[in-house]
Amino acid sequence: MTTYREAMREAIRAAMRADERVFLMGEDVGPYGGTFAVSLGLLEEFGPERIRDTPLSESTFVGAGIGAAMNGMRPIVEVMTVNFSMLALDQIVNNAATLRHMSGNQFGVPLVIRMTTGAGRQLAAQHSHSLEGWYAHIPGLRILAPGTVTDAYGMLAPALADPDPVLIFEHGTLYNLDGELDDQTAVDIDSAAVRRPGRDVTLIAYGGTLGTALTAAEQLSGDGVEAEVIDLRTLRPLDDETVMGSVRRTHRAVIVDEGWRSGSLAAEISARITEQAFYDLDAPVDRVCSAEVPMPYPRHLEQAALPQPDDVVAAVARMTG
Amino acid sequence: MTTYREAMREAIRAAMRADERVFLMGEDVGPYGGTFAVSLGLLEEFGPERIRDTPLSESTFVGAGIGAAMNGMRPIVEVMTVNFSMLALDQIVNNAATLRHMSGNQFGVPLVIRMTTGAGRQLAAQHSHSLEGWYAHIPGLRILAPGTVTDAYGMLAPALADPDPVLIFEHGTLYNLDGELDDQTAVDIDSAAVRRPGRDVTLIAYGGTLGTALTAAEQLSGDGVEAEVIDLRTLRPLDDETVMGSVRRTHRAVIVDEGWRSGSLAAEISARITEQAFYDLDAPVDRVCSAEVPMPYPRHLEQAALPQPDDVVAAVARMTG
Amino acid sequence: MSVTATNQIAPTGQDGHRRDLLHQMLRIRRFEERCVELYSAEHIRGFMHLYIGEEAVATGVMPALTPQDAVVSTYREHGHALARGVTAEAVMAEMFGKVTGCSLGRGGSMHLFDAATRFYGGNAIVGGGLPLAVGLALADRMRDRQGVTACFFGDGAVAEGEFHESLNLATLWRLPVLFCCENNLYAMGTRIDRAQASTDLTGRAASYGLEATSVDGMDVLAVETAARSATEAIRDDGRPRFLEFRTYRYRAHSMYDPDRYRDKAEIEAWRERDPIDALVRHMREAGELTDRDLSGLEADVDAEIDAAIAAAHAAAYEPVEDLTRFVYAEVSP
Amino acid sequence: MSVTATNQIAPTGQDGHRRDLLHQMLRIRRFEERCVELYSAEHIRGFMHLYIGEEAVATGVMPALTPQDAVVSTYREHGHALARGVTAEAVMAEMFGKVTGCSLGRGGSMHLFDAATRFYGGNAIVGGGLPLAVGLALADRMRDRQGVTACFFGDGAVAEGEFHESLNLATLWRLPVLFCCENNLYAMGTRIDRAQASTDLTGRAASYGLEATSVDGMDVLAVETAARSATEAIRDDGRPRFLEFRTYRYRAHSMYDPDRYRDKAEIEAWRERDPIDALVRHMREAGELTDRDLSGLEADVDAEIDAAIAAAHAAAYEPVEDLTRFVYAEVSP
Ligand SMILES: Cc1ncc(C[n+]2csc(CCOP(=O)(O)OP(=O)(O)O)c2C)c(N)n1
Ligand SMILES: Cc1ncc(C[n+]2csc(CCOP(=O)(O)OP(=O)(O)O)c2C)c(N)n1
Ligand SMILES: [Mg+2]
Ligand SMILES: [Mg+2]
């Protein structure tokens, strides 16, 4: 068995062994081993030139990653958490995402940015954001959200091979997830995956909410409702085909997304289903998202704010009942 | 006749005369008169203490606005354009939007932030964003988008009276808009407005796309299709009632939004219509948004990227034809 | 001898002044030692950052402030809150996530707020508090109030753009901010010389044209003297000042940190300079403190914290129905 | 005497060196004067920021760079691009929005790019180019290449957080960046002393521990000397250097700017120090330049720019079908 954390670490290790242009930079990736211990031990193997601790300067070390990528390197930049990436947003939106198009294809930015996302660990209002939906709004970026151990490992190599910037969102509650790392080859980063087949309703989730959707599907199954669970995996570009294929069969869809409901990625999925599969729907598409509130610290309030399997079950019940 | 620019200026003037806690701060609001000449002449009337030029330090002068608001002032912070607001995003999301809830209602942030948004002036990839939809995702903020001269004037006073942070998005192409400033009183900042009644389809727009929708409605009227045009006006919280009321009558809806399509505010409106008025729909909700591309400089490409009246007409034709 | 559990410090030179400082440091130290146990017992959750070793800084700075002054802090702020006068009970309940906490339990360890003492948090974004402090001071200046805003941040924060922007703006606009840099040599696992091109932080600050002084942050009397002279200067000419406090945290960065990046010997060397031990020694030598006095202080502190913990245990959680209250104000415009 | 329309500058001390510098400055000046007309005629649109008055800076810095070096610039970059060797034709076509432009016409005045000369733009976000420059230099360092990255930015950019972060990081990591601050005393309408608490920009830069020098930016020979010695030093020890060029823009900030915030007298005073006039005077006194030489240079420049304009007029626009090409690379991974 391998944890999600280990899978990520081994993927970095493999990439760094395979290509000397790859290096890791970010706050405390070195002696500390990474805030979430992802890079533990890598400094010893690769040394401080390639496992580079940065000062607390998010905008500049992300920008430096962009510059280094434009100049022949294949940086992996770790932004400790998505909460801090707001300080680097200008560099991501105005430079990383834009340079290829704006320069008429003269310069590309083959950069990978990894960050932790999500709530669930009682870290309160400033450390619990799920802003991957924001990034999925930006043309020029590719957005990945590994939700399994296999994806945690297998998404990095194709992300590094991508000639354009790729952001990888790692949900903070997944690092201890244990799983079989069955496939040590690169995975397909263009497609969503059906994680559980079903015929009655499609549950669409990714990253941190994949488990929520699968738990809900189990519960529903006990009630005789067979839910198909789709793991989006890639949030930009979205794999409409897999989603619509499923909805056309089940005629019902619920999106489970940890982002705040208004303006969530779930809204985009809902709009697309309307646009592409309206006449196949037996019920309005529904969303189970986070309550629209800065995340409170106490566990009972945090759990109340987050999408729960019961909320998914209730949403399905409303549309099938 | 009054221009949108003048209306905004007079609104600031009136607010500053009425309440000495109000002051304006931002880059070049002083001797320069504001990049878009909104504050021209205000320095002469109110002096440099209340019309405060800031250094190029977006994060800090927005943060300082938050601090000043918490400590008894009623600042109006001008961020020259939404493009630069990304540098201040952390302050807006993690402080302005969060402090009241996080502090258990001990502190509030009665702050107004004004910024220009949108494309259409050939300013290319880094100066043409429409990111108001992003801000509309954030609990704790109120988001306004005046699309008329009356709203440009009338939204400021209630925004300043709001005990919570309010962001006002002024579309760059509207400053020269001329209109009757019929009503010099505060307007209602909770409601959307029906700008043109119609029975066949609902066009939903705001700010810079209001004109696009109205032009399309004129064209459609010539073809015998009567479009109702709704101006959202307030992007957070959204006025679902007005939107659903209209859709329930017209049974069709097209959202016109200058944001990039994927993850746009238009997606949220679409999802809400699905959730609240699904069984009233005669056709799938459609969206007319910007092409998903960093904005190119030449006029023909910029216009091709932006939502045009013809695109709206075509979308309506698809659903009525 | 007995003291009451408050943040009152007798004026310098007066009887009881040093005793009060000692009491305050003991109180903060003991509070956090108990927090460690409570964290292990899972009464406290999330991120928790301890101030143990750095007590002299908060303890020495706060007496220089008046009730009209304001404080902006970080996620490592238990000491600041307690020294500023937020009650141990309110802080402890907050860490339990109880509704009697100083932020209704919503903030936890990283987000202590208290309007009564003008304690503006509790900010978990490194550097994020600096612009707020500038703004608080701006409002005081514009409204002709006398307040000073004390803003605490770490050595790591000095690398952030907001540090630069805030020092520039406060100096340019002559705002009454006391910038208090707690230089504990590390930002998480990154030693200062691996994050700052120049570790001369006062030199950096002085390049904006503001007066900057480096202070022994392990000596509470030195801290207090420096803070008093800086706040007096600020009240005098309205301009900001920068103080660097050289200090050290004995514990790991947070409860999650396995502390792999430091030498035990380094920690030991700093413990030799422990601010509490130093003051105790000093007072003993001056004949100001007997063993009984010290036990008395410790007993007082223990009693206060026991009571705070008991109250936190007994307190209620905020009802789940109130989850979305106060996202916006409840009075409408 | 005749020169070819390139960015080739004869080596210092060699025959033709000063003539080449003069030619370059004339070329940039004339190019932009024509741009003003073209803007009025609406062939050029959007924001356009002129460099007129500041030509000595780009002209003096570029000869110190090799083809392996890189350049990162701002929205006020016509001069940088031309002096670096992007052809007048490619720049002019870009400003017309034509597909023959150096960015396919997609960028316009603010976004000139040219891979062949390692010209990395053209950045319309103030301060946004500095982190890129740090990264370009980092890659050179990690790959053991000799390149220096020259990064241009204005006095206004010094207030941005990214300035601070980038100077710190480049100095800390010893990266070969030449920071070129074009101090023209204004950021739009804001005079430097109303934006910077300390207007001593080299002092500010030096506080990071990097060598910083202030240079007369109206004297192309002084600029070149400073740039050469800085790039040599960088090549020598791999560390960054900071140069402040004191210069002035004669024109408004952009074509939209009514220029209400400056004294005519101030502009006149700077015009007296015009870098082109100064060099002409100097060369005349040294007997290096006759009236005929000067007319010859001017005629060459006019011919080059006429040709560039004619080509821009004649060129095609990018087809609208290509709008979304190159948002992503067309080869898949
Ligand atoms: C903007 C931002 N980046 C990263 C972090 C994660 N983080 C929390 S504390 C910390 C170290 C800060 O060090 P310093 O400023 O010296 O304060 P100390 O913890 O030593 O008191 C880091 C990197 C954060 N909270 N905010
Ligand atoms: C982050 C950001 N804020 C504001 C602007 C608007 N703006 C464009 S140029 C400029 C002034 C910059 O001054 P300076 O750095 O001195 O360069 P100069 O224009 O004088 O060459 C401003 C405020 C911007 N482009 N980017
Ligand atoms: Mg520290
Ligand atoms: Mg300037």
Image (spheres, coloured by chain):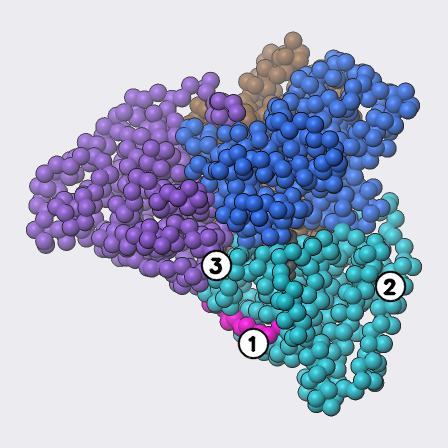
Chain colours: A blue, B brown, C cyan, D purple
Rounded to the nearest whole Å, what is the CA distance between mark 2 and mark 3? 44 Å
Residue type at numbered disc 1: Ala
The residues colored magenta run: C209-217
Q: Secondary structure at mark 3?
A: loop
Rounded to the nearest whole Å, what is the CA distance between mark 2 and mark 1? 40 Å
Q: Are marks 2 and 3 on the same chain?
A: yes
Along the polypeptide, which appears first: circle 2 or circle 1? 1
Residue at horizontal 59 percent and vertical 19 percent from the top: B312
Residue at horizontal 51 percent and vertical 71 percent from the top: C211
Q: Quadrant of residue A130?
A: top right
User: Residue under circle 1?
Assistant: C233
User: Residue under circle 3?
Assistant: C197
Q: Is residue D151 visible?
A: yes
Residue type at numbered disc 2: Ile
Extreme-top residue of the structure: B321
Q: Is residue C13 above or below residue B58?
A: below
Residue type at numbered disc 3: Ala
Assess whether mark 3 and mark 2 are in contact (beta carbons under 8 angstroms). Answer: no
Give the total number of marks visible in the rendering.
3
Extreme-bottom residue of the structure: C287
Q: Position of residue C85 (x, y in %)?
A: 76, 70
Q: Chain of mark 3?
A: C
| Label 2: how many Cα within 10 Å (few below 14, some 14–19, many 20+) | many
User: Residue under circle 2?
Assistant: C309
Residue at horizontal 41 percent and vertical 30 percent from the top: A106
Q: Secondary structure at mark 1?
A: helix
